[in-house]
Amino acid sequence: MCGAYRLAHRSGAAVYSLDMRLSKAVAQAPVGVPPGWSADEFGSYFRQNTIRGTPIMTIRVWMTALVCCFLALAGEGADAQSFPSRLIRIIVPFPPGGPTDVAARLIVQPLSEALGQNVIIENQNGAGGRTGSRYVARAAPDGYTLLLGGTNLNSIIPAIYKNLDYDPIKSFTPVASIASDGMVMVVNPSVPANTVGEFVAQAKAQPGKLKYGSAPGIASHLAGELLKYRAGIDVPFIPYRGGAPAITDVLGHQIDMLFNNKAVLLALIQDHKLRPLAVVADKRWTELPDVPTMQEAGFSGFPTDIIYGLLAPAGTPDAAVEKLNAAVNKAMQSETFRVGLTKLGIEARSMSVQAFGAKLADDTAKYDEIVRLTGIKVE
């Protein structure tokens, strides 16, 4: 219901109520004409100021309000047709170089071309992605400020954090999915373990010595905690501001192990800078045919994909959301995007607005169960 229609409804109701009160008062008043008026004068006044018995003031209020409504609807249509008319920002709530940042940089150029408007990336990292998410949740719902979110920010965070000053689900409108990525468990090459079983055995022999890292409250963190729960091992968790600094530290052997995405780890594995122990997937990766899945390694129950996509602040007009969704799906057909995905070994994941929202809701239920099992608590 547009604002002008609501105004018309309220104004009309008020005038109608006043008319009814006046009619009731007239009905209860003594029969006759107002003092000082002749019957002919009063009849002439009544005929001039009503139309078929309805006061002209009532009709004027309704007509004015309806005109306002039509103008408002016309304005909304014009805005939808002209969107976007200025620069669009994609907020990445993690440092540059991590998997979320990589997903954003793959789509930004073809999306700019599809929309015919500049699209830029802003990294607003901090608090495991919650700082940038909060910023977008509070932005104007006009389609010009978007969040590069998905599984980590909109399915896992609501499973862990219950007292945020924004809602990771209700504060956003799903726009479009972009890609689906998987995780792999890796260790620094100096760690004497070639399988998950050997890593577990070493962790049991030396409780608390081996360490792993991740940004807190995202898929890589939950995967590490789920392994600890399933294996019954003591491997301290080291929190980081994002995936990129955690990867830097496992390369430098400040930490021993981590889970992270194919998009950022595959090249390091292929260059023998990190050793893979298992992939978090339904089947082995084509690029790493000798590396087993977590289930093959004896550990089941790990969610097997991470979705990346764009979300807008709740209340963003449907026309803008649908236009953005169509532009993203068009951008995903570009050669630049396809080549970038192939190099990283990840898959395009195109979904409707409704399907993307349903996927995030389904993932939230899965991660709720992992949080319940592991008892993860993040401050």
Image: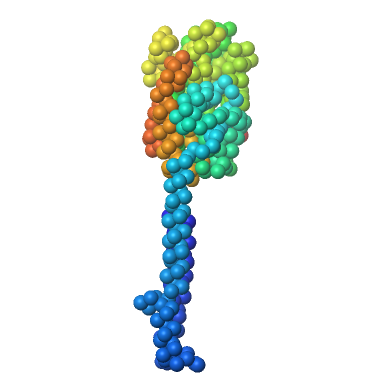
Q: Nearer the viewer, residue 115 or 3?
A: 115
Residue 375 in the image: x percent, y percent?
Answer: 52, 32
Q: Is residue 24 visible?
A: no
Name which residue lies at 57% across and 20% down.
97
Please tell me which residue lies in front, 43 or 179. Answer: 43
Relative to 30, is 257 above or below?
above
Q: Residue at x 42, y 91 (%)?
A: 39
Q: Is residue 157 above or below residue 280?
A: below
Determine which quarter of the picture holds residue 80.
Answer: top left
Residue furthest left in the image: 52
Task: Name the residue: 47% across, 45% down.
Answer: 79
Q: x, y (%) of residue 177?
A: 43, 30
Up-down: is 61 above or below 161?
below
Please determine whether, in this image, residue 84 is positioned above or below residue 211.
Answer: below
The residue positioned 48% from the left and 61% from the top of the image is: 7
Occupied quadrant, residue 1: bottom left
**Residue 194, how many percent across, how many down?**
49, 8
Q: Is residue 290 visible?
A: yes
Q: State the quadrant of the C terminus.
A: top right
